[in-house]
Image (cartoon, grey):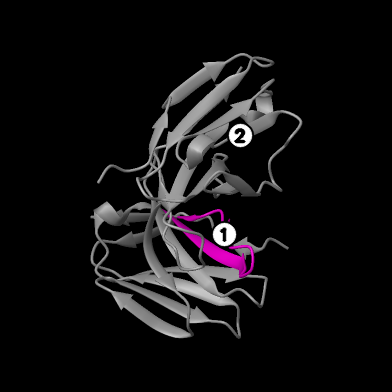
Amino acid sequence: EAGVVQSPRYKIIEKKQPVAFWCNPISGHNTLYWYRQNLGQGPELLIRYENEEAVDDSQLPKDRFSAERLKGVDSTLKIQPAELGDSAVYLCASSRRTGVDEKLFFGSGTQLSVL
Amino acid sequence: QKEVEQNSGPLSVPEGAIASLNCTYSDRVSQSFFWYRQYSGKSPELIMSIYSNGDKEDGRFTAQLNKASQYVSLLIRDSQPSDSATYLCAVNIDYNTDKLIFGTGTRLQVFP
């Protein structure tokens, strides 16, 4: 079974530039999460999808961040314009469904450096 | 007060020893607790989950939960150098919204 696939693995951009990250969850997983992990910190949830619907985006900085999950499968997270403080690892995770005991499977992440 | 607190470490233990990793949480209604392992430059992977007070054992790993003290721990017996990683405690702080909060992680170093 293929795991959660993310691309690109690394991205270096200058501030004020746009950037996009892509995630393909495990087949059959209805719930998809985007997390941001700063160096030395734990992952912080940005947005959670159940199928196509964003059910928790309270931590997403909506002035510059946007996300979509068309057809309830792949998802894209975009930052426009990027700021220096956006440098972090962006992790995508998926689970079969939403539930307190559901296991999250993480992708390898995209390491973003904003110069 | 942070919702999930961990000592950042590093915690250094010799090979073969027991490593004890601790985590406290602030929300008394939290129901689900998880330990993730994260190797340097890699993504987190779930190693243990626990929902009831007491101990839960899986191989060399034992998770311990004490809801009255709002404390969850992970014991690693017979520690191996390959166990060297950052261990993240995660707590579901809201049963209704299924929101998982991660601690900052404890870095474990197992030396030969």
Is residue A103 placed above or below B59 in the rendered structure?
A: above
What secondary structure is found at the residue carrying circle 2? strand
User: Which residue is under mark 2?
Assistant: A67
Q: Quadrant of residue B3?
A: bottom right
Read off the magenta span: B86-106
Is residue B111 placed above or below A22 in the rendered structure?
A: below
Residue B18 in the image: x percent, y percent? 32, 71
Give a yes or no on whether discs 2 and 1 share a subunit: no
Front position in the image: A58 or A89: A58
Residue A24 in the image: x percent, y percent? 41, 36
Residue A3 in the image: x percent, y percent? 32, 43
State yes or no: residue B17 in magenta. no
Q: Residue at x 52, y 18 (%)?
A: A12
What secondary structure is found at the residue carrying circle 1? strand
Front position in the image: B88 or A96: A96
State left or right for residue A62 relative to residue A28. Answer: right
Q: Residue at x 37, y 41 (%)?
A: A4
Residue A102 visible to the viewer: yes
Q: Quarter of the image containing the N terminus of chain B?
A: bottom right
State left or right for residue B2 relative to residue B60. Answer: right
- Prevailing secondary structure of the magenta residues: strand
State yes or no: residue B87 in magenta. yes
User: Which residue is under mark 1?
Assistant: B100
Disc 1 chain ID: B
Q: Type of residue at label 1?
A: Leu
C-alpha gap between disc 2 and disc 1: 19 Å
Residue that extends furthest to the front in the rendered view of this protein = A71
Tell me, for residue A109, which label it has, or none.
none
